[in-house]
Amino acid sequence: MPEGIDAPPVAPPHNAVILYSNNGSNLRNRSEASWVVLGGSNPSNTGTKAMATQVKPIPDGYHTITPYIVVDDAERIIRFMKDAFGAQPVFEPMMRPDGKVMHAEFKIGTSIVMIADSSERAKATSTMLYLYVPNVDAVYQMALKAGATSVMEPMDQFYGDRSGGVKDPAGNHWHIGTHIEDVSPTELKKRAAEMMKQQHKVA
C-alpha cells in the first residue's frame, strides 16, 4: 500500500474487521475496501467465524514490480506522461490538504506507474524506466514535444531493440524501445563483447 494511505477509502460496517497484510497494509481491490463481516457485533466473541473472502494477492492489472515516481511537481509529470505516452488514470488522484498529489496511478500500455509529490517522509528522487512501444521513433518525438530533453536518439541496438532515451522535466530517464530482433543468449554475449571492444578502441 503506498505511503500516506493508512485508512480504507470508505467506512466499514460496524461489525466488520479490516483485513491487513503481514506488512500492516490494508488489503483492497484498489477502489473498494475488502471487509470480513462477522456474525455478531463483537468480533472477539468465542466461536464467531469470519466469512471467507477471495482476495487476489496481486490485483488485476498489476505486475510483480510497479514503478513509483516521487517528484516535486507530480502534476507536471502526470501531464508529461499523458502527452508523451498516453497515460490513463487508474482512479482519480488522491490529493493532500495542501493541494499536492498524495498518490496517483496511471496505466501506460499494459503497466501501471504510481506517482506522488515529495514530502518529509518521501523525498524527490530520479529514476530510470524502460518503456516498450510499437514505434519508438514516433513516441520519442512525442516525448520531446511533451517537454522532455533528448538523452539518446533512437537507433538499432546489439541486444535486439531499437531504442532511444529522454529525460522528463523532473529528471527521470525514460528509455523507449521497440523490439526488432530476437537474439539468442550466445549471440548476445558475442555482440556485447564486440561492442565493448569497439568502445575500448574509441577510448
Image (cartoon, helix red, strand yellow):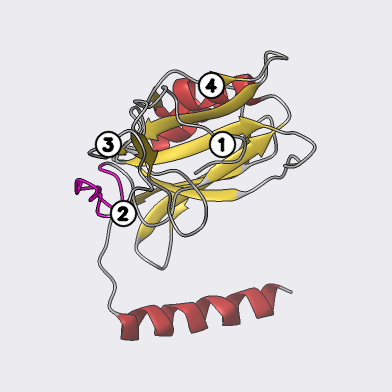
Whole-percent x and y of residue 45?
Answer: 34, 48
- In the figure, is residue 188 to the left or right of 22? left
Q: Earlier in the sequence, mark 3 or mark 4?
A: 3
Judged from the image, the secondary structure of the residue bearing numbered disc 3 is loop
> Neighbour class for label 1 at 10 Å: few (<14), some, many (≥20)?
few
Query: In the rendered view, would you say 41 is above or below 145?
Result: below
Whole-percent x and y of residue 40?
Answer: 27, 36
Whole-percent x and y of residue 12?
Answer: 38, 27
Mark 3 belongs to which amino acid? Gly
Q: Say which residue label 3 marks.
A: 40
Q: Say which residue label 2 marks.
A: 46
Q: Nearer the viewer, residue 84 or 39?
A: 39
Residue under the image location 31 percent in, 51 percent down: 58
Q: Specify the segment rendered in magenta.
A: 47-60
The mark lying in front, picked from 3 and 1, is 3
Q: Earlier in the sequence, mark 3 or mark 1?
A: 1
Q: Are marks 1 and 4 in contact (CB under 8 Å)?
A: no
Residue under the image location 75 percent in, 34 percent down: 119
Q: Say which residue label 4 marks.
A: 94
Asked if residue 138 shows in the view, the reply is no
